[in-house]
Image (cartoon, rainbow, N blue to C red):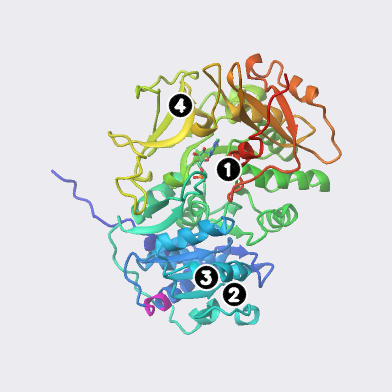
């Protein structure tokens, strides 16, 4: 017997309707190329999204066609999110920091028909355009006064593109399983792969991240996503914020500018901010130098890479800010775990709390986790057994776009292999020890590069660091510590290696240290270990 409940589809347009009705006046503040501080509201953004949906309706697009964006976080990009998905097309957000070959591959593979682009990226597009086959038109995200000169054809100005359109628009009734958005993985090995989200997966994920122990979002929050709208839909914030009516503060092209971020947080009463560790490293360095304190910020969600202990400490001790570490991936919409203390843990000492805080967090309801050994047996949650982390849930991909059945990403019993190596403890807290391909195997035993990096990041002279495996005659592989020193600091190799004493088991301590000026970063700000390994391909440990 079925329940007698309405079968209303979970659609992105329903979020738009809700935000417009209930949170019409709630502010959205953006930095754009044409306006250093643009103020609008959820009501206006959704109204303009309806205008844009009308404009899209004239382009001859079919349901499911892809419309791409190459843009930073601002109100126009948000309007595209709602217009494109809400009207039944697929919003394909592209990371502009990818290599040109990857951008060409992605635009062609996705068969994007129209592209919405920030004026800043026009020179990039002009270089690629000849090799992009399916693009029919381009819309530049600005007003007429700031339109860049270009020799490309069929280029429109966003403000003029929507100006004459009515703000009445009947969002179509779609199947909740229809594709809504597309995001490619960064593809450190092989071609980038497309993850195709549905309306249903997006809404369920957004509900999940709203929860108190996840992002804990409410209409009283002012939220600064420093995570780009092209990085896994800014971790679901554009949807979750509209659901609850949070204020959004969008930093546009100023994502990496510590001073602007600080100013925005202060002037816009930001109490929740989200981003990858490298972003916060820049902000913490700015506040330290400028002698500022983040008075209004209450908590920050940091994920996308392991969060160093010193970062959690710095936020807590210097700024009174709670850090919640999260883990997830493009294939998971992206959130799988978030770190908040369980009942009773508030009585732990600050150090013990930090020991928990450096973990990736606990699985949220809706994301099942398991850790498997090499023989495919499930490992116990004992805080020491490590193996391949697999996940399952309604916002985890079931396959990759146009690779259906060919990607070998899933197990026969329907779990997704994350490519991460993890330990889960008895309380359900996950520790990510490495990417499978970054694992260092010394004498047949695994060494966690992430844990070593975490330790050394607390050294006062270290600006950033990475640990990679280097071939070793006796042990197979041994860790090499690669360090970027802080300005005016000059720590010796011995001093850095001794810093690991009593913090990790002695056989984990790296065999040597190499100093470099800058670590190679991926397009989403993570350390590019593949490039680092290439850079040190000829390195040999001293005898
Ligand atoms: P992406 O799909 O580009 O967001 O990358 C996802 C990958 O980032 C994961 O599979 C992890 O390897 C890594 N990652 C994300 N969050 C964390 C975290 N908290 N700790 C360690 N690694 C992380």
506 w.r.t. 237: above or below:
above
Give the CA separation, mark 3 to mark 4: 48 Å
Task: Identify the mark nearer the N-term, 3 or 2.
Answer: 3
Give the CA separation, mark 3 to mark 1: 37 Å
Task: Identify the mark nearer the N-term, 2 or 1.
Answer: 2
* Tag 2 secondary structure: loop
Report the residue marked by disc 2: 142
- In the image, 71 versus 265, the foreground residue is 71
Report the residue marked by disc 4: 428
116 w.r.t. 194: above or below:
below
Residue 85: image quadrant is bottom left
Report the residue marked by disc 3: 129
- In the image, 67 versus 128, the foreground residue is 128
Position of the N terminus, as image quadrant, is top left
Task: Identify the mark nearer the N-term, 3 or 4.
Answer: 3
- In the image, 533 versus 238, the foreground residue is 533
* Tag 4 secondary structure: loop
Q: Is mark 4 within 8 Å of ligand 1?
A: no
Report the residue marked by disc 1: 301
Residue span colored magenta:
55-59
């Amino acid at each position: 017997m079925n329940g007698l409940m309405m079968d209303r589809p979970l659609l992105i347009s329903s979020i738009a309707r809700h935000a417009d009705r209930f949170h019409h006046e709630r502010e959205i503040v953006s930095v754009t190329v044409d306006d250093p501080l643009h103020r609008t509201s959820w009501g206006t953004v959704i109204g303009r999204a309806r205008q844009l949906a009308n404009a899209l309706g004239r382009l001859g697009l079919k349901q499911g066609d892809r419309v791409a964006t190459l843009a930073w976080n601002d109100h126009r990009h948000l309007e595209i999110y709602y217009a494109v998905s809400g009207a039944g097309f697929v919003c394909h957000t592209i990371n502009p920091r990818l290599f040109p070959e990857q951008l060409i591959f992605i635009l062609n593979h996705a068969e994007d028909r129209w592209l919405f682009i920030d004026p800043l990226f026009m020179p990039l597009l002009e270089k690629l355009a000849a090799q992009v086959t399916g693009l029919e038109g381009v819309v530049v995200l600005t007003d007429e006064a700031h339109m860049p000169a270009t020799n490309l054809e069929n280029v429109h100005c966003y403000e003029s593109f929507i100006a004459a359109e009515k703000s009445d628009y009947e969002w179509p009734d779609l199947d909740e399983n229809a594709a809504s958005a597309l995001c490619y993985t960064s593809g450190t090995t092989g071609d980038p792969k497309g993850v195709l989200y549905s309306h249903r997966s997006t809404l369920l994920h957004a509900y999940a991240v709203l929860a108190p122990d996840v992002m804990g979002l409410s209409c009283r929050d002012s939220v600064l996503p420093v995570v780009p709208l092209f990085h896994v839909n800014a971790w679901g914030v554009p949807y979750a914020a509209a659901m609850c009516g949070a204020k959004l503060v969008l930093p546009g092209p100023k994502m990496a500018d510590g001073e602007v971020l600080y100013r925005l947080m202060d002037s816009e009463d930001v109490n929740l901010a989200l981003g990858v560790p490298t972003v916060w490293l820049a902000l913490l360095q700015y506040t330290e130098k400028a002698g500022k304190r983040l008075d209004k910020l209450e908590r920050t969600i940091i994920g996308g890479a392991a969060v160093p202990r010193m970062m959690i400490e710095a936020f807590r001790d210097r700024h009174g800010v709670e850090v919640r570490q999260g883990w997830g991936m493009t294939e998971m919409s992206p959130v799988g775990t978030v770190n908040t203390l369980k009942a009773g843990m508030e009585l732990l000492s600050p150090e013990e709390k930090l020991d928990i805080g450096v973990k990736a967090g606990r699985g949220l309801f809706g994301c099942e986790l398991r850790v498997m050994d090499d023989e495919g047996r499930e490992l116990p949650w004992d805080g020491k057994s490590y193996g391949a982390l697999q996940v399952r849930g309604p916002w985890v991909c079931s396959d990759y776009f146009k690779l259906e059945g060919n990607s070998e990403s899933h197990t026969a019993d329907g779990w997704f292999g994350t490519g991460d190596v993890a330990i889960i403890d008895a309380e359900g807290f996950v520790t990510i020890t490495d990417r499978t391909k970054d694992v260092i195997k010394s004498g047949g035993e695994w060494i966690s590069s992430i844990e070593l990096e975490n330790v050394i990041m607390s050294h006062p002279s270290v600006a950033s660091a990475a640990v990679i495996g280097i071939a070793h005659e006796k042990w197979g592989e041994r860790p090499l510590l690669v360090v970027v020193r802080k300005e005016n600091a000059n720590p010796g190799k011995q001093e850095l290696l001794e810093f690991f004493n009593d913090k990790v088991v002695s056989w984990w301590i790296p065999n040597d240290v190499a100093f470099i000026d800058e670590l190679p970063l991926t397009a989403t700000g993570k350390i590019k270990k593949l490039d680092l390994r290439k850079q040190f391909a000829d390195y040999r440990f001293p005898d």
